[in-house]
Amino acid sequence: MRSTSTAAEFHAKVVPDPADAEVWLHDITGTALVLGSTQDADVVDVEACRRAGVEVVRRRSGGGAVLLTPGQVTWVDVIVPTGSRGWADDIHAPMVWVGRHLAAVFDELVVEGTVAVHDGRMITTAWSPVVCFDGFGAGEVLLDGRKLVGISQRRTRHAARLQCCWYSGYDASALVDLLAPAHRPAVAELAPIATVGQEIAAAIPAALTARL
């Protein structure tokens, strides 16, 4: 299923009960800075976001801030109903499950580089509580050791909603400039991330859907 709306509207979308196993591909209509569920709002430079026309959104899953820019990010949610293939009581297992499927698809389509899935404890840095892509969580996909796919999870009693994104273009300074001065790293302090060409980025959702 493909949809188009603001980031806030898509985050507010409710998974039906009962849920079906689905892949939701979403195109955002405007740039958004998405904060984790428990992240302090004071990490944001509200005036900088206003000047740049960037919507500030809070998601219901944990982690740091993610900058979503139309044309530069691919956003896919994988819905895993309770008890279905991919589901597990262990909250990390569905993320590893979808990460392995994503890694297989990227490995088929990416011409160069080593694709791997992070299947272990959360790897944090000094800045990962602020900037989500600076750390590695369960199931997240790496390309030559750099984070390629970020994954977060929203779970209810009837389904897990695995929210995944990857970039075809990424400017760390664009995110940094939207953070409040007290929470603003130097770009050089952030871990570099991996990106893929737009054609590959756009081809992944259909290939993932076919695998699932």
Image (cartoon, rainbow, N blue to C red):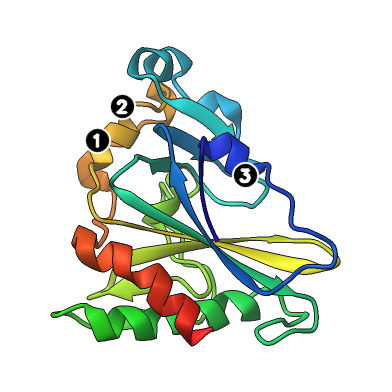
Labelled disc at residue 177: 2
From mark 1 to mark 3, how far is it between C-alphas?
Answer: 25 Å
Q: Residue 24 is drawn in which quadrant? A: bottom right
Amino acid residing under circle 2: Asp
Mark 1 and 2 residues: CB-CB less than 8 Å, in contact? yes
Confirm whether residue 58 shows in the render: no
Provide residue 125's location: percent of width, then percent of height.
Answer: 41, 56
Provide residue 35's location: percent of width, then percent of height.
Answer: 54, 39
User: Does residue 187 appear left or right of residue 121 in this picture?
Assistant: left
- Measured along the vertical axis of the image, is residue 185 above or below residue 199? above
User: Does residue 185 appear left or right of residue 43 in this picture?
Assistant: left
Tell which circle, 3 or 2, labels the residue nearer the N-terminal end: 3
Provide residue 85's location: percent of width, then percent of height.
Answer: 68, 87
From mark 3 to mark 2, how far is it between C-alphas?
Answer: 24 Å
Give the residue number, with chain letter if any, for mark 3: 11
- Measured along the vertical axis of the image, is residue 124 above or below residue 31? below
User: Does residue 78 appear left or right of residue 85 in this picture?
Assistant: left
Q: Residue 37 is drawn in which quadrant? A: top right
Labelled disc at residue 173: 1
Question: Residue drawn at (80%, 61%), measured in percent from left and top?
Answer: 156
Query: Quarter of the image containing the C terminus?
Result: bottom right
Confirm whether residue 177 shows in the render: yes
Amino acid residing under circle 1: Ser
- Give the crowd class for mark 1: few <14, some 14-19, many >=20 residues within 10 Å: few
